[in-house]
Amino acid sequence: MNDTVIDNFSKLKSSLFIVPLLLLVAIVVFLFSQHSLSVEGYIQVQKNLFYFINSKYSQFPTLIYNLTQLGDALIFFSFIGLLLIYVPKIWETLLTASIVSALLSAVLKNLFSVPRPAASFDTTTFTIIGNALSGHSSLPSGHSITVFTGLSIFMFAFMPKKINYKMLWSLGIVCLGILLVLTRVGVGAHYPLDTMIGGIIGYISALIGIFINRKYPIWSWINNKKYYPVFIVLFLVCIGVLVNKILHENLIVFYLALLSLIVSLYKIIYVYIKK
């Protein structure tokens, strides 16, 4: 399976950057046409859409709040622990892409400094699920970047060979991603364009991660079992963090992530001892 992923990654071309870049340009052109390139204009032009999505998604508060946690890197990585053993190339690429996405997220949030919905709108007029976020770090959505970084890597890693299956697989991944990132609007943490732009940046981050890893295999040591103790310690720390999360917020997604991490820890210890 790891060889299949390596082969799929080797076939990717830089032309894949064209569509996401065109989408970003299209968003800028739309904002310009609406005289909404200012912070206030950016917020107001999508106010009605924000209220609409928030009202629809917030009808399922428990489900939405659980799903939105998948944009937390700790939760996302907890679910793919076993791939460290069976498909290490996924982890190698995700680590590089995650660093790229984290840097882009931090730079862009500081650059745009857009106030979150709770800082712009009357909080009694929309639904907030979880903690009310009111800082000036709305654009882009970090959770959305994480979701699309991970999903895009999976999309390319396991891309089918037949064109019909490729289209269905890609469409399915994109639809799943959109469903997940819009939960950030549902919980009242972001505007719709925050999530869309975040998703595009996540896709770009995934491609950058793939291309960097293809040329500079800086994480190739992950495939070496003698370094497994590093991940054993890391998984133990993550288990501690997840337990703490469960004590503060009793969410089913945390239990599932914890179970996945425990299984991954057991398996990696087993493989290490048997080496």
Image: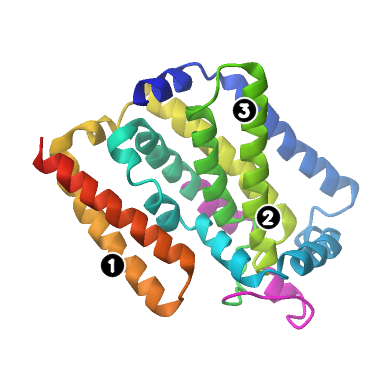
Residue at position x 39%, y 46% in the image: 80
Q: Looking at the picture, tell me which residue is in the foreground, 132 or 38.
A: 132
- Which mark is in front, 2 or 1? 1
Q: CA distance from mark 2 to mark 1?
A: 31 Å
Mark 2 closeness class: few <14, some 14–19, many ≥20 residues within 10 Å: many
Question: Which three-letter amino acid code belongs to the residue tagged 3?
Answer: Phe
Mark 3 closeness class: few <14, some 14–19, many ≥20 residues within 10 Å: few
Instruction: Provide residue 223's location: percent of width, then percent of height.
Output: 24, 32
Q: Looking at the picture, tell me which residue is in the foreground, 181 or 117.
A: 181
Quadrant position of residue 142 = bottom right
Q: Residue furthest bottom?
A: 124
Tally the numbered discs. Answer: 3
Q: Which residue is mark 2?
A: 194
Residue at position x 43%, y 57% in the image: 75
Whether 119 is among the magenta residues is yes
Q: Which residue is mark 1?
A: 240
Q: CA distance from mark 1 to mark 3?
A: 38 Å
Question: Which three-letter amino acid code belongs to the residue tagged 1?
Answer: Gly
Residue range (magenta):
103-130
Q: Earlier in the sequence, mark 2 or mark 3?
A: 3
Q: Which residue is mark 3?
A: 17
